[in-house]
Image (cartoon, rainbow, N blue to C red):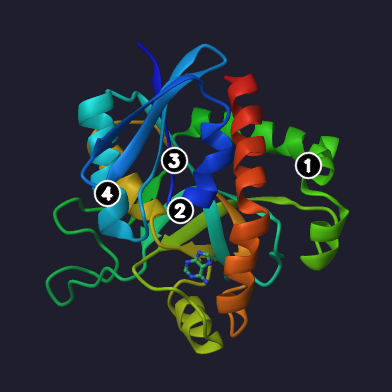
Amino acid sequence: NRVIGIMGAMPEEIEGVVALLSNCTQTTIGKRTYFSGQINEIETVVVFSRWGKVAAATTVTTLIHKFNITELLFTGVAGAINAELKIGDIVLGKRLIQHDMDARPLMPRFEIPLLSKTYLETDVSYLSIASNAIKALLETKSLHTVIGEQDLIEFNISQPRLFVGDIASGDQFFSKNEQKQHLISQLPNILCVEMEGAAVAQVCYEYKIPFSIIRTISDVADDHAHLDFPSFIKKISSTYAAQIIKNIFSAI
Ligand code: ADE
């Protein structure tokens, strides 16, 4: 029986998705509220985890054990690391890495102890479904209509693009150029940084649950990040998440 788990890290990142649920019921476990219902007749459970790797890992574990999810979608925001990315662009994680994992000299830098893995990979069939759905969303320009002129201008969003590649996660908010440059010097291929994706990916890998990590760029992880991030969260992130999830559900 198919049950899709949908996670975000903040209330604003899931409220638009919760609104898509029919027959919605709530369950509270361990300070998290799980919203169950159906989207397009598919059983779905939506939750926000709070920030960081521990919060995300325990929440996805609860989704697996208590709600019997068979697949997991994560939507949220991220700070851009690659210079080509702009606020409003969407990143689909191909590989996830925990940038703060460092058990040297016992293990190589970034390797997850006893898993013999540095990168956690997204299921390929899931990746193509999600990327086609997001490309379709961006091509129809329907995002523009729901976001509205004023916010598009404020965030300087003209034609958002989809990028597919590596995402780094760790228990750090990037708000200094030096943090960003340091990450680039260690991991030059990273597209964006956030605080949950690679933790969710690790748990899903361990339980053999196909997953997809989808991030909208809310800031460019620089000295302005502490201003851009809350403003994007407040005004736009829920709309992005709901539109992305709607399009993915039409494709599955
Ligand atoms: N999520 C969104 N912006 C971020 C940043 N600058 N650092 C870490 N996580 C983020």
Nearer the viewer's eye, disc 3 or disc 1?
1
**Mark 3 residue type:** Thr
Tell me the SS state at disc 1.
helix
| Rendered location of residue 108, percent (x, y) | 23, 69
Identify residue type, mark 1.
Answer: Val
Location of the C terminus (image quadrant): top right
Q: Give x and y (percent) for residue 124.
A: 49, 33
Query: Disc 2 vs disc 3: Cβ atoms closer than 8 Å?
Result: no
Q: Position of residue 39 (x, y in %)?
A: 54, 20
In three-dimensional space, the C-alpha distance between marks 4 and 3, rounded to whole angstroms, equals 16 Å
Real-space Cα separation, disc 3 to disc 1, in angstroms: 29 Å
Name the residue beneath numbered marker 1: 146
Residue 62 against residue 40 in the figure, above or below: below
For mark 3, does the 10 Å Cα neighbourhood hold few (<14), some (14 to 19), or many (20 or more) residues? many
The answer to which of marks 2 and 1 sits earlier in the sequence is 2
Q: CA gap, disc 2 to disc 3?
A: 22 Å
Q: Which of the numbered marks, if any, corresponds to residue 57?
A: 4
Labels 2 and 3: the sequence-earlier one: 2
Query: Residue 208 versus residue 155: which sits nearer the camera?
Result: 155
2 vs 4, front mark? 2
The vertical placement of 218 against 146, above or below, is below
In this view, 51 is above or below 59: below
Camera-near label (1 vs 4) is 1
Image depth: mark 2 or mark 3 in front: 2
Residue under pointer 2:
10
Residue receiving disc 3: 122
**What amino acid type should be assigned to the residue bearing mark 2?**
Met
Q: What separation in Å lies between label 2 and label 4 (alpha carbons)?
A: 15 Å
